[in-house]
Amino acid sequence: MDTPLSDVFEHFPDALILADGEARVSYLNPAAERLLGLSLNNTHGHALDKVLTLQDGETRHPVQIGDFPGQHTPFAGSFHLLVRNGGGAIPVQCSVALTRSGSGATAGYMIVLRNASGLQQYIDKLVTQSMHDEHSRLLRRAELVKRLWRLLQETDESEPQAFMFLDLDNFKSVNDTAGHAAGDLAIRQIAARLKDQVRGRDTLARLGGDEFGLLLERCPAERARQRAVQLHRAVESYVLRWNGNSYRLGVSIGLALFKTHQHSLNGILAAADAACYQAKRNGSSGPHIQEIELD
């Protein structure tokens, strides 16, 4: 005597959906009813694509069950999203198996869904940690470069842009005199000061050691110059207090002004780096902000 599906899959922990060869729902186990927010009585015989709504976790584009078999796409950092009955979407792991008749024709579908909310949160946390510097909490160099590259690919060439390199002065003496713990504190506090001076659309990153980078999108030249002065003042007015001693730092800034599509990524980075190097060579007697206009 055959065992009913309800007995076989009643305690199955993952959501299980069975559909016939015409992609009409024939069975939902209790876990599927809970995950979908639907009952078997209300879905039996209904078209699968009316019962199960999936989206790509990155693009939010609809995903059809027929897209799964035979595809082996790499994990992109986000699971598929299950749009639940009544609204809301949750990340899910989804696997699809085809059942076939003796003639080889598709006899049905078996879909297994697993709630991946906790795993997605963990992955998102790891991604965030990999993008951010552990001391300053700012973005890392790779993310800054990626955003500059994307800006060069996507933005209209007539829009003004700016990129800065900022190199702290006297930071090595703080490390040598007060120790690396004091240096780490200085980096955190200066990073917070710099962050207070930038717009939400701008990208501020720690490039490593005592260097920072700033991408100012759609920023006219005069506004970029003003921002450089504000950043310079934010660092110049900073005082590190450590074990009863006070330490002051300075900053040299290289500002590259450009328009997208007219210059390469490496050209912009090199120009800002060269301007920063010149600003540092000027010393205390010269300007600490050096500008290069590429257009």
Image (cartoon, grey):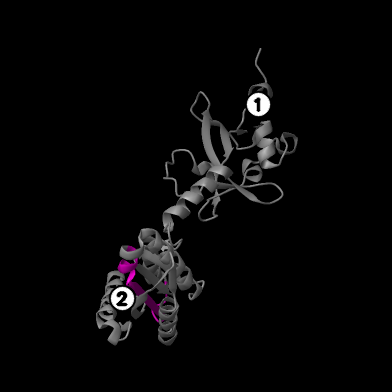
- Position of residue 159 measured from the top left corner of the image (x, y, whole percent): 42, 80
Q: Which image quadrant is residue 155 in? A: bottom left
Which residue is more in the foreground, 173 or 289?
A: 173
Query: Which span of residues is magenta-colored?
Result: 155-175
In what element is the residue under mark 1? loop
Which quarter of the rendered picture does the C terminus lie within?
bottom left
- Position of residue 65 measured from the top left corner of the image (x, y, whole percent): 54, 42
- Position of residue 89 measured from the top left corner of the image (x, y, whole percent): 62, 50
- Position of residue 96 measured from the top left corner of the image (x, y, whole percent): 53, 36
In what element is the residue under mark 2? helix
Above or below 154: residue 26: above
Residue in the picture at 32% in, 86% down? 287
User: Mark 1 or 2 closer to N-term?
Assistant: 1
Q: Which mark is nearer the camera, 1 or 2?
A: 2
Q: CA distance from mark 1 to mark 2?
A: 62 Å
Q: Is residue 152 left or right of residue 32?
A: left
Q: Amino acid at mark 1?
A: His
Which of the numbered marks, if any, corresponds to residue 272? 2
- Residue at the far front in the pictured view: 244
Which residue is more in the foreground, 175 or 228?
A: 175
Q: Is residue 215 visible?
A: yes
Within the magenta stretch, is there residue 156?
yes
Which residue is more in the foreground, 105 or 278?
A: 278
Instruction: Tell me, yes or no, whether the two marked residues, 1 and 2, touch with CB atoms within 8 Å.
Output: no
CA neighbours of label 1 inside 10 A, class few (<14), some (14 to 19), many (20+): few
Residue denoted by label 1: 11
